[in-house]
Amino acid sequence: TLTSQEHTLEVGAEESMWEILHRYLPYNAHAASYTWKYEGKKLNMDFTLEENGIRDEGEEFDSLNMDGALYTPAILLYFNDDLTE
């Protein structure tokens, strides 16, 4: 969050946070050295997005005739000073 960089990944509902992290590595090779949080809560990397409380609200947006692309949940990465190379 310090450098305000943003990357958008489209992920499957069944993917664990570890799988998402692995796909994020091309953007940040040290992604495992960060604490991943959503709404201030640390995410369990063994869980899926939904198991971590991040719901897919696409159907709800559709039922309200709203463009779901206007809202994308943001996962913030916080640097851990763990001295990885």
Image: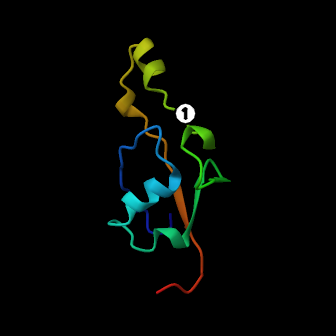
- Residue 10 at x, y = what percent? 35, 43
Q: Residue at x 52, y 53 (%)?
A: 17
Please give left or right for residue 41 compared with residue 7 in the image: right
Image vertical order of residue 54 relative to residue 60, above or below:
below
Q: Residue at x 43, y 62 (%)?
A: 4
- Residue 56 at x, y = what percent? 49, 31
Task: Decide: few, some or many residues near mark 1? Use Cα within 10 Å; few <14, some 14-19, many ≥20.
Answer: few
- Colour mode of the rendering: rainbow
Q: Residue at x 36, y 55 (%)?
A: 7
Q: Residue pushed farthest left?
A: 26
Seen from the viewer's position, the closer of residues 12 and 29 is 12
Query: What number of labels is visible?
Result: 1
Mark 1 lies on residue? 55
Hey, what amino acid is under mark 1? Arg
Please give left or right for residue 41 compared with residue 84 in the image: right
Image vertical order of residue 44 relative to residue 80, above or below:
above
Q: Residue at x 37, y 58 (%)?
A: 23
Image vertical order of residue 78 relative to residue 6, above or below:
below
Seen from the viewer's position, the closer of residues 2 and 24 is 24
Q: Secondary structure at mark 1?
A: loop
Image vertical order of residue 35 relative to residue 69, above or below:
below
- Residue 48 at x, y = what percent? 54, 44
- Residue 3 at x, y = what percent? 44, 68
